[in-house]
Image: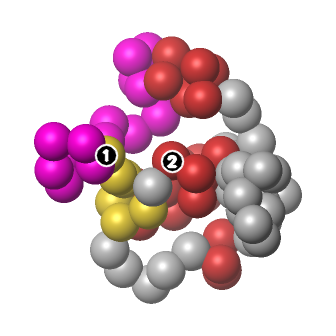
Amino acid sequence: MTSINQLPAEGYVRLSQIIGNPKANPPIPAIIPVSSTSWWEGIKSGKYPKPVKLGPRTTAWRVEDIRALIQSI
């Protein structure tokens, strides 16, 4: 699991930065090790923060929301 210190200081993170992507080159380690299906179900249930649409095909999460989630776990 990646540490909270590897998140940017401010801004947005994409899903692959949160749940990781071992197939990327280089591999992206997970900050929150869950599947994408579990992540989206967690959003629907309120367990995980809601995303922000940055464009028609771009979804991201505020770093502050992800840091708060990690602190609450």
| Residue type beneath disc 2 | Leu
Q: Are marks 1 and 2 in contact (CB under 8 Å)?
A: yes
3 or 55: nearer the viewer = 55
Residue at image coords 58%, 59%:
17
**63 horizontally vs 15: left or right:** left
Quadrant for the N terminus in the image:
bottom right
Answer whether residue 56 is magenta in the image: yes
- Residue located beneath label 1 in the image: 59
Q: Mark 1 or mark 2, which has the lower sequence index? A: 2
Residue sticking out furthest to the front? 25
User: Residue 54: horizontal and vertical position, in percent?
Assistant: 19, 54
**21 horizontally vs 63: left or right:** right
Q: Is residue 43 visible?
A: yes
| Residue type beneath disc 1 | Thr
- Residue located beneath label 2 in the image: 15
Magenta-colored span: 43-58
Q: CA distance from mark 1 to mark 2?
A: 8 Å
Answer whether residue 53 is magenta in the image: yes
User: Residue 63: horizontal and vertical position, in percent?
Assistant: 41, 65
Mark 2 nearby-residue class (10 Å; few <14, some 14–19, many ≥20): some
